[in-house]
Image (tube, rainbow, N blue to C red):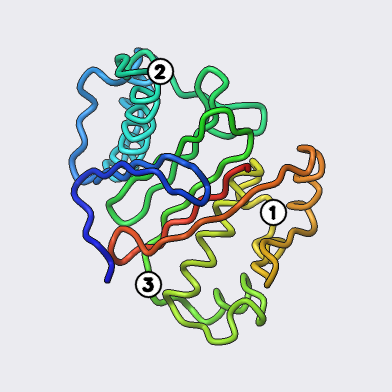
Amino acid sequence: MTRAATTDTTETWPETGARLRFLRTDAPEPGEALSPAETLRLSAFRLDKRRREWLGGRLAAKALLSEAAGGAAPALFEIGMDHYGRPACRGTLLSISHSGGWALAALKPESDFLGADLEKIEERHPAWYADYFHSSELPVPEPSAATRLWAIKEAVMKALGLGLMAHPLDIKEGEKGIELKGKARDRWLAMGSPAFSVETRPFPEGFWTAVAAGK
């Protein structure tokens, strides 16, 4: 049975060692958590949905940073990007995702390889299954299994700092773990071929979450 999530949940996933925070984005308020530059960026969003998603992700990430620093004020942690375009703060890598009214942030101190993705389980167009999954990965196009695999691919692409610049077919879940080719493999090799593990859970209810983190 999938356990229920409250409006905010923080936990450590044992297989990857990543610390995750889930936060509802229905009505997040910045309070005093944002820096002046972040407050300015928040005010620039025209769409309320995009504003809530961005703010929810930042609040979740800042909560993790504050916790790791012994409760320091969240506003002290301004989140920018590293040279691969991944969320980072003072050299600490983060990963942020949002889907279906939830935001997710992940943190693993001293890790140079980290990506997390949150995806709502839903039926998709038949072409989506054909375009993004190997038949050996997904012999039957079932929504929950496909959503889990998509979250894995997104998490790995985020950890590589590629996003959708790499094709999802370049990342495959095989019997011996994650297999990379094309741009995904090229970036992984350029990063020094870091060893990493992937962990997935059907959480929150109706979603799949995947984390890829360096060992």
The residue beneath circle 3 is 122
Tag 2–tag 1 contact (CB < 8 Å) = no
Helix, strand or loop for disc 3: loop
Few, some or many C-alpha atoms within 10 Å of disc 2 (few <14, some 14-19, many ≥20)?
many
Helix, strand or loop for disc 2: loop
How many angstroms separate mark 1 from mark 3 (CA)? 23 Å
The residue beneath circle 1 is 166
Q: Residue furthest front?
A: 14
At horizontal 46% and vertical 24% (from top left) the residue drawn is 79
What label does residue 77 carry, if any?
Answer: 2
Q: Dividing the picture into quarters, in which one does residue 12 lie?
A: top left
Left or right placement of residue 61 versus residue 25 in this view: right
At horizontal 24% and vertical 46% (from top left) the residue drawn is 24
Tell which of 199 and 102 is nearer to you.
199
Q: Nearer the viewer, mark 2 or mark 3?
A: 2
Upstream in sequence: badge 2 or badge 3: 2
Q: Quadrant of the C terminus?
A: top right
Residue 57 place in picture, x, y as percent: 36, 38
- The amino acid marked with disc number 3 is Glu
Tell which of 179 and 82 is nearer to you.
179
How many angstroms separate mark 2 from mark 1 (CA)? 30 Å
Upstream in sequence: badge 1 or badge 3: 3
Residue 49 place in picture, x, y as percent: 29, 45
Left or right placement of residue 40 versus residue 48 in this view: right
How many angstroms separate mark 2 from mark 3 (CA)? 35 Å
Upstream in sequence: badge 2 or badge 1: 2
Residue 53 place in picture, x, y as percent: 33, 42
Few, some or many C-alpha atoms within 10 Å of disc 1 (few <14, some 14-19, many ≥20)?
many
Q: Is residue 61 above or below residue 198?
A: above
Q: Is residue 179 above or below residue 36?
A: below
Tell which of 85 and 3 is nearer to you.
3
